[in-house]
Amino acid sequence: MRRSEWNPCGGGVVLLLLLLLAGGWSLAWAYLPDVNIFTNYRTEVYNGIPSEIDTTPFVRIADNYYYIETMNKVNWFQAAGACRMMNAHLASIEDKAEMEALIKYMKAKGFKNNDYFWISGNDLGTEGAFYWLSNGRPMTYAPWNGPKQMPDNYGGNENCVHMFATREMINDANCKIQMLYVCEAREPKTFKFTYIKW
C-alpha cells in the first residue's frame, strides 16, 4: 500500500504530530501527505479551565472543581464509586479556606444544616487514624463537630466522615448511612491550538 492510499479520515491524514513543551507553549507540526506540505500550529498550555468553557456537572469553587450530589443519597462506598465513575474522588477538605469556600457556596444554593454530605475522610484502616481516601494523606485539618471529644466512634462503627452543608464542621458516621456526597476533580490542563500561516 502506498502512503497516499492510507486515508481513513477522508481528508489530509496527520502522520506525525510532535508537541515540544517548553515554557508553557509548544509547536505542533503535522505532515499531511495528500497535499504534501507541513502545517504549523502554536499550542498554549493552561492550568485550569477558561471561564468560557462549561464544566458541568462540576462547578469551580475557589481553586477547586466539585460535583455536589443533591438528589441521590447513598452510602460512603457507593459515593466513592460514583465519584470514580466521573474520573473524580470524594472531596478532601484539607484546609480552612477550602472548607469556608465550599460552605459559602452551599449556603448560597439554599442547603440546610441538616443536609449531610460524604467526603473522603475515613479510619477504615486503623481505628482513630483518619486519612483522606483520595490521596492517602492524614487528615491534619479536621474541625470535628460537637462539644464532646470527636470523633467518638459512636456504637463502635463510625469510620467514615461527612460534612455539614452550612457549618464548618465534620463528623464521623456509620459508612452504611445514606447521604448526599461531594466529589472533587483535580485541576485540569487545557490546550489552545492556533494555526499559523506560512
Image: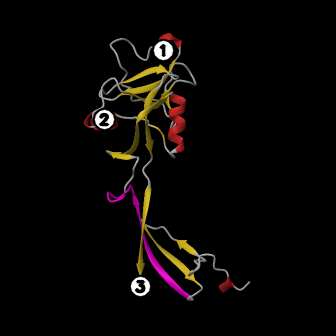
Percent x, y of residue 56? 39, 50
Question: In the rendered image, which quarter is residue 100 located in?
Answer: top left
* Residue occupied by mark 2: 106
First in residue order: circle 2 vs circle 3: 2
Judge whether residue 38 is colored magenta: yes
First in residue order: circle 1 vs circle 2: 2
Percent x, y of residue 159? 51, 21
Residue 124 can be seen in this image: yes
Question: What amino acid type is highlighted by mark number 1?
Answer: Asn
Label 1 – label 2 distance at C-alpha: 27 Å
Percent x, y of residue 69? 42, 37
Q: Secondary structure at mark 2?
A: helix
Q: Secondary structure at mark 1?
A: loop
Comparing marks 2 and 3, which lies closer to the viewer?
2
Judge whether residue 105 is colored magenta: no
Q: Which class describes the residues within 10 Å of circle 1: few (<14), some (14-19), or many (20+)?
A: some
Q: Which class describes the residues within 10 Å of circle 2: few (<14), some (14-19), or many (20+)?
A: some
Q: Which class describes the residues within 10 Å of circle 3: few (<14), some (14-19), or many (20+)?
A: few
Percent x, y of residue 8? 63, 76
Q: Quadrant of the N terminus?
A: bottom right
Question: What amino acid type is highlighted by mark number 2?
Answer: Met
* Residue occupied by mark 1: 153
Examine the rendered structure and indicate whether residue 108 appears above or below residue 124.
below
Question: What amino acid type is highlighted by mark number 3?
Answer: Lys
Q: How many marks?
A: 3
Q: Which residues are magenta?
A: 37-53
* Residue occupied by mark 3: 197
